[in-house]
Image (cartoon, rainbow, N blue to C red):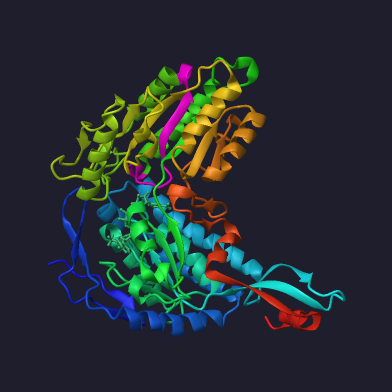
């Protein structure tokens, strides 16, 4: 029998009373560990986090909390090798892909430690300038942001067990809000191990960091009005969460990061060359599409799913992407010649096959990865699938714009051909908008004015617009890489949430209040930090 990972709640380690759910190696099929949350007293655990963790964190200044984040970074750095081993075993990722999760987590935490240090010895944040409410200017309104006096429940998706924890927990702890994390069951081991290391190192106050692994049953019922819920996962689960009484009736603040059918767009080049796209831009697009299809086997919420190219570039784009995909080797991440590992579970593999079949019914298959030979892995056991490129000759088909296959799958879509460049770009933007709101779109071209105008045209439908031009080819951070300096989240179907974006991330964990008082009272706020 595999060991059950202990949960950390109410300041102590607690093992569920049930049999638990088994986590498996998705490549070798071996049983790893079990998780179980049955029988936990969630209400008591949440109360402990609010009363002890929250109180201790709020007693500290931003600078002191930033030092806590730095201490967490040190702990994670010291145990980094173990995290890589767990990621290989439980997520089936090659080292490069594990780094996105593990080193991405450490990088993001360091960023928030740096931000916190700049906020100094305060315990609340100013929010704009005072506005006079009286003719003599003596009575004023000043907005302040203060830490929420609840806990932050973080419910995460399976694809980022490391980064998904710390990109949320960093801003929460810096804000003075205690965290309870519920990782996705399939990959809960890495999250649990990181929490275990940090708790055992004793670098955070008791109650500041708790973890519940296993079934989410009862978690939302234990929330109270001043708590916060930050959810990452599918749109279906988000819908269930939105209608839970804690959200719908009690007003628990909710942030949702959900599905997204992200797009990459190759623009037609300058007006004088309206008949063709710039060759270099096309190469950059092909590089990025292949990276996005293959990193973490396409299991990234920000991955490129739709690739829009001018109709006359369709064949050239298909050939450029296919040539690069031919160099991808799929299989056991422990084999040094493998460049792409597996999906996280049999359930995910089945879901990818089903989504692919639905898309293939209305597209042509340009590169078929389903029959790709596997290196060092048994196709009957390993949850591996090669990258598949589809082609939609009919750009208007709904399914292409609405289906997120959470794996190494993208669809090439032609646009334009009217002979009018503005009209063609307008058509491409309209197609991108049929994704109903996305996390990120990337643009490829050479003409700054056209790229800037197109970025603004798309901005209300995207959380981020990533523009790749030849001059930044070597320095751009990647379509799908979420940088802590930039907003993460998207409107509409993407959930409507906002995370990261530098100091903006702290807004979710603070409450804004308008203080109406005399200038003398408002002036005393600065000294009463
Ligand atoms: P999921 O099935 O929706 O699960 C997400 C999390 O919700 C898991 O921790 C899950 O726990 C939990 N959960 C399930 N039912 C719940 C309920 N009724 N109440 C509370 N929590 C519940 O999503 P997933 O399969 O893990 O992740 C894949 C999806 O996440 C994709 O659609 C992807 O686009 C999206 N995603 C979005 C982002 C983003 O930032 N926008 C990032 C990553 C992934 P269990 O695992 O125990 O069921």
* Magenta-tinted stretch: 296-313
- Say which of 486 and 394 sits in front: 394
Residue 279 visible, this orientation: yes
Residue drawn at (32%, 33%) of the image: 328
Residue drawn at (42%, 57%) of the image: 163
Quadrant placement of the C terminus: bottom right
Count of marks, rendered view: 0
Task: Indicate which quadrant contains ligand 1.
Answer: bottom left
Q: Is residue 75 above or below residue 439?
A: below
Tell me where residue 294 appears, x and y as whole percent.
36, 39
Q: Indicate whether residue 280 is drawn in magenta.
A: no
Tell me where residue 332 appears, x and y as whole percent.
24, 43
Residue 286 visible, this orientation: no
Tell me where residue 165 appears, x and y as whole percent.
41, 62
The quadrant where residue 316 appears:
top left
The quadrant where residue 424 appears:
top right
Q: Is residue 196 left or right of residue 382?
A: right
Tell me where residue 25 appears, x and y as whole percent.
21, 53
The quadrant where residue 41 appears:
bottom left
């Amino acid at each position: 029998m595999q060991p059950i990972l202990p949960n950390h709640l109410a300041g102590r380690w607690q093992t569920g009373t049930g049999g638990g759910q088994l986590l498996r190696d998705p490549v070798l099929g071996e049983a790893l560990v079990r998780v179980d949350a049955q029988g936990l007293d969630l209400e008591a655990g949440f109360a402990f986090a609010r009363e002890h963790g929250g109180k201790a964190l709020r007693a500290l200044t931003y600078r002191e909390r930033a030092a806590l984040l730095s201490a967490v970074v040190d702990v994670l750095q010291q145990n980094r090798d173990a995290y890589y081993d767990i990621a290989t075993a439980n997520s089936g990722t090659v080292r490069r892909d594990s780094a996105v999760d593990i080193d991405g987590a450490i990088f993001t935490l360091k960023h928030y430690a740096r931000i916190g240090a700049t906020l100094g010895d305060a315990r609340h944040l100013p929010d704009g300038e005072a506005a006079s409410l009286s003719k003599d200017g003596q009575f004023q309104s000043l907005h302040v942001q203060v830490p929420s006096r609840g806990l932050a429940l973080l419910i995460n998706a399976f694809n980022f067990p490391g980064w998904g924890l710390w990109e949320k927990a960093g801003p929460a702890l810096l804000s003075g809000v205690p965290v309870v994390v519920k990782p996705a069951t399939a990959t809960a081991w890495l999250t649990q191990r990181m929490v275990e290391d940090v708790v055992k190192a004793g670098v955070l106050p008791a109650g500041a960091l708790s973890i519940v692994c296993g079934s989410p049953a009862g978690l939302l019922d234990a929330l109270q009005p001043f708590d916060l819920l930050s959810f990452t996962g599918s749109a279906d689960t988000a819908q269930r969460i939105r209608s839970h009484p804690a959200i719908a009736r009690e007003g628990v603040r909710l942030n949702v990061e959900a599905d997204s059918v992200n797009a990459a767009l190759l623009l037609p080049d300058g007006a004088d060359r309206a008949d063709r796209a710039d060759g270099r831009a096309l190469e950059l697009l092909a590089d990025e599409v292949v990276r996005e299809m293959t990193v973490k086997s396409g299991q990234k919420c920000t991955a490129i799913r739709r690739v829009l190219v001018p109709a006359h570039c369709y064949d050239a784009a298909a050939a450029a992407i296919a040539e690069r995909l031919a160099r991808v080797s799929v299989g056991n991440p422990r084999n040094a010649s493998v460049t792409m590992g597996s999906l996280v579970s049999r359930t995910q593999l089945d879901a990818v096959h089903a989504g692919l079949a639905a898309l293939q019914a209305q597209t042509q298959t340009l590169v078929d990865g389903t029959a790709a030979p596997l290196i060092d892995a048994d196709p009957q056991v390993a949850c591996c699938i090669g990258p598949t490129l589809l082609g939609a000759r009919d750009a208007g088909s709904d399914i292409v714009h609405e289906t997120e296959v959470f794996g190494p799958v993208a669809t090439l879509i032609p646009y334009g051909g009217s002979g009018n460049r503005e009209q063609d770009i307008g058509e491409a933007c309209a197609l991108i908008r049929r994704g109903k709101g996305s996390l990120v779109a990337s643009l490829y071209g050479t003409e700054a004015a056209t790229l800037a105008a197109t970025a603004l045209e798309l901005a209300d439908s995207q959380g981020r617009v990533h523009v790749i031009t030849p001059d930044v080819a070597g320095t751009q951070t990647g379509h799908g890489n979420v940088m802590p300096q930039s907003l993460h989240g998207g409107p509409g179907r993407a959930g409507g949430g906002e995370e990261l974006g530098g100091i903006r991330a702290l807004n979710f964990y603070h409450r804004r209040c308008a203080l109406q008082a005399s200038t003398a009272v408002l002036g005393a706020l600065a000294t009463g930090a």
